[in-house]
Amino acid sequence: MKDIVKKLDRAFNPRSVAVVGDKREMGYMWLRSLAHFQGRVYSVQIDERELPGIEELGVKNYLSLLDIPDEIDYVIVAVPRAVAPKIVKDCIEKKVGGVMLFTSGFAETNTEEGIRLQRIIAEMAREANLNLIGPNCVGIFNPKIGLCHAMDQYYGDGGNVGFISQSGTHATFFSLMGEVNGIRVSKSVSYGNAVVLDSTDYLEYLGEDEDTEIIGLYIEGVKNGRQFFSTLREVAKRKPVLIWKGGQTEEGSRATASHTASLAESPLIWEALIRQCGAIKVDNLEQLLDTIAALLYARPATGNRVGLCAMTGGQSVVIADAFAKAGLEIPLLTERSYREFASFFDIIGSSYRNPLDISSNFRSLDNIIRCIDILNNDQHIDAVVLELSVLFLTRLGWLVPNFFDNLIDALTDYKTRSNKPFLTILVSAHAESEAITAKKKLVERGIPSFPSFERGAKTLKKVVEYYRLHSA
Amino acid sequence: MAIEKVISAARKEGRTYLTELESKQILKEAGINTTEIKLARTKKEATSLAKELGFPVVLKIVSPDVLHKTDAGGVKLNLKNEEEVAKAYDEIISSVKKHQPNANIQGVAVQNMARQGIEVIIGMNKDPQFGPVLMFGLGGILVEVLKDVSFRIVPLTRRDAREMIREIKGYPILEGYRGQEPANIAILEEMLLKVSDFVENRPQIKELDINPIFAYKDGAVAVDARVILEP
């Protein structure tokens, strides 16, 4: 077992968890989040008024961490900041596997007291080699064992995507939005102020974690940039790593005596770093989830030439604009493909140059599938994109019963036999609630879908670039 | 070793800015091709060095106090014979003295006049988080206007060097746009790797600009350079 795995294993895969300082005012959110935890749960609370509420939840309470007659692997701390040093001291004495401080009010407040308390807990933890996560974070999510940090997170089946987030909100959003997009977390961690453990440690850990195949990061800043650089370079060779960089660091004023210094702004350096390490740069949560979905559910891209199918003329023009603008090619098809189209394609009000405008041909399921099959078999094409307009599909459903369900069955068959990345663009127009239902069905079948041409195009560009970089 | 000697000499004088002469000595030691440059302390030395190097030559003021040599009248280009060199020497000295009366003048550098090539820049700067970072781009005055540059964190792999050259928008110019002489990309890659190696092992160096480098189809030469030391 690698050192980092040995070091963090108890914290990420605990068999016992203690919650310190949960209270009614917070709706006992921490104890409730552990309702489905597969190990043992304990509470530590000294406020007598809170004890009945904790008892109601069926959790045994102790007045001190040190009183618990069990080994404790992971501690969740939600006490006021002034009490934090005392709890950290108890954690050291108890030899816990890891402690997460939900408690905030430290250096992030930029107050003398906050900075002082942060220094105290950091020094204590470092000296004792205590795995301290945070403070000012929500810590670990390991759905496989029911270790959640929010009551609405899933549990039971874990996924294969790891997430490392400096922000607790983004960690929670990632897990919940990921789930509805078919992306399930293997393990995730929100790590806040990173006073002891930093992104580099978690990246190294998830790099080794067998359940984790893809890693996402939300980072505001790193402490040891050189170490982060070498770890990222190493991990990104083995697993796709996506980086969403929040904020722009202003590390004091910079000398601008040379050109290089004045041009080397931090966002540019981050961009270079991500590229240099073979990671994928994303700019927001949507892009992070979109790109992971494409990595998970589309076949690896081998080139940047796209075959585009839109449902109407106007859409065929702008789908081509979006994909071309993203830096992808929309080439003419082979003569053979054009001969095949000529044999069945109704060109009245439609067109099959590339982009395709399927229009009236959309009434026949067979014809839709035939179109994307031709694109899939065309030597000029590396990836196939199909627009699914919820508005038109709903109207078709009035004429042909179960049209959408049958279409999804046919697309699932197509996806199974196709050998090129296949993306759908689910254009909802005004039919937003129908789009949600349609999206769900596509997710269930593992067909990646995107709500706009632009998002689909940017995603495809990112994965094409990723596979290009890693195939050479 | 010459690099340490140059650095400690500057330190002794309390300088963090190295002169062009010193900067090029350091680069040469790092295996980077620079124009031939020699220090002349007198007019006579200047003419005999020019003869030794072969005409045409360039004369530039050597003074740690003069940062913008051209502005101070401290640069004379394309000098074709001894008379021109002698005249240029006097003009440089008097112009700099007029411009910056208190400047410490070490002499005048005599250099080969390099044939014009495609101007590129290679630079190094220290990022507060990631340490030494290399920059590549189209050089000369273009770098200030177009900011068409790419970055990589040290140490560079060969692939990084390859990619950072190809990443700039002006790459077609390096390939020889519309019949212009192309730049030898392999040699520029090699130069980037040498600079990467060099700065990785020299924490004393804070910033580095090699600008311009003249890139040709069969070579590349550093025409001007500036090294800034850590305080």
Image: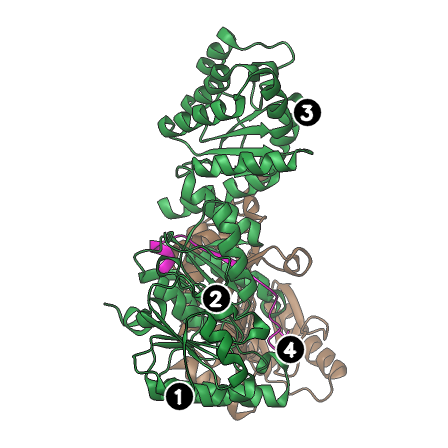
Chain colours: A green, B brown
Q: Chain of mark 1?
A: A
Q: Which numbered disc covers residue A32?
A: 2
Up the image or down, B226 lies above or below A267; here it is below
Q: Nearer the viewer, mark 2 or mark 1?
A: 2
For disc 2, the neighbor class at 10 Å (few under 14, some 14 to 19, many from 20) is: some
Looking at the image, residue A433 sits to the left or right of residue A340; the answer is right
For disc 1, the neighbor class at 10 Å (few under 14, some 14 to 19, many from 20) is: some
Question: How far across and how far down the image is residue A448, in percent?
Answer: 48, 38
The image quadrant that residue A87 belongs to is: bottom left
Asked if residue B161 is among those painted magenta in the image, a careful observer would answer no
Q: Nearer the viewer, mark 3 or mark 1?
A: 1
Up the image or down, A341 lies above or below A291; here it is above
Q: Secondary structure at mark 3?
A: helix
Sequence-wise, which precedes: disc 4 or disc 2? Answer: 2
Q: Nearer the viewer, mark 4 or mark 2?
A: 2
On-image quarter of the C terminus of chain A:
top left
Q: Which numbered disc covers residue A253?
A: 4
Sequence-wise, which precedes: disc 1 or disc 4? Answer: 1
Residue type at mark 1: give it: Asp
Highlighted magenta segment, given as a residue range: A234-257
Sequence-wise, which precedes: disc 3 or disc 1? Answer: 1
The answer to whether residue A190 is visible is no
The answer to whether residue A164 is visible is yes
